[in-house]
Image (cartoon, grey):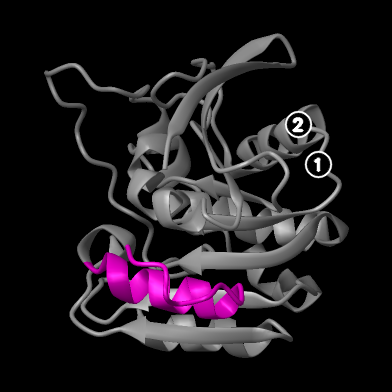
Amino acid sequence: METRVKEIEINGATFQYRETGKPSTPTLIALHALGESSESWDKTAAVLGEKYRVLALDQRGHAGSARFDTYTIELMCEDLLHFANAMDLEQFTLMGHSMGGLVSYLFAETYPSRLERLIIEDIVPPSDEKPKEIPSKPSHSLPFDWLVIPSILGQHNEPEWWAHLTDISVPTLIIGGGSSKTSQNKLQEVSELIPDCELVMVEGAGHYVHDEYLPAFLTAVRKFLNINPCVKP
């Protein structure tokens, strides 16, 4: 399955994205984790691209997309809205991992009418638990803007998003890693707050479920999307 790397202008800034699948099929937008890129979805997109047009977006400050002075989950959520509008998408399925999952939660709470389905990989919304520790900036060059790290990690103790989880009205799948640092109890709590939500735990997997346990990840996603399971990863 061929993946095409493309660029698009959003509010005067260049964003890079990867497209897999036929434009005539339903669209699924995939959002990567902090410090990662759209390329992290290539193996997943190669399978889902049989039935979906998968658009994996490099979020602001990452890989081939523009660098900015400010990074917040709210701004990334607006980037996603502008991207969907620029791609002329009235509705689509949204899949987000880690930081991309935070953006996805917020988008689903804010723009529920734009989504058909929601898939979250191993992340819960920010809470009032112990704030995330901000690591020191490394001396070597990075494939993303370092400013993203302190900006996004600094938002991990803003618990107000929990109050709006009940506003997520689309069918939702949460996939967690059984060995991940993400609290299984918290994932369960989130799944119970979202009205139409299924939680799948992949035992043995860590935070990067779709990398470490791709077949199990795809099994859960294909079942949720009603894709014939005979397609092999």
- At horizontal 52% and vertical 62% (from top left) the residue drawn is 126
Q: Amino acid at mark 1?
A: Leu
Q: Residue at x 18, y 80 (%)?
A: 204
Q: CA distance from mark 2 to mark 1?
A: 6 Å
Q: Is residue 37 visible?
A: no
Q: Amino acid at mark 2?
A: Met
Residue 45 lies in magenta, yes or no? no
What secondary structure is marked by label 2?
A: loop
Q: Quadrant of the C terminus?
A: bottom left
Residue 139, horizontal then vertical, whole percent: 12, 19
Q: Residue at x 38, y 42 (%)?
A: 34
Q: Is residue 81 left or right of residue 95?
A: right
Q: Which mark is residue 139?
A: none
| Viewer-side residue, 145 vs 202 | 202
10 Å neighbourhood of mark 2: few (<14), some, or many (≥20)? few
* Residue 87 numbered mark, or none: 2
Q: Position of residue 96 (x, y in %)?
A: 51, 55
Q: Tell me whether circle 2 and circle 1 mark residues in contact (CB < 8 Å).
A: yes
Q: Residue 7: x, y in percent?
A: 57, 17
- The residue wearing badge 1 is 89
* Other-residue count near label 1 (Cα within 10 Å), few / some / many at <14 / 14–19 / ≥20: some
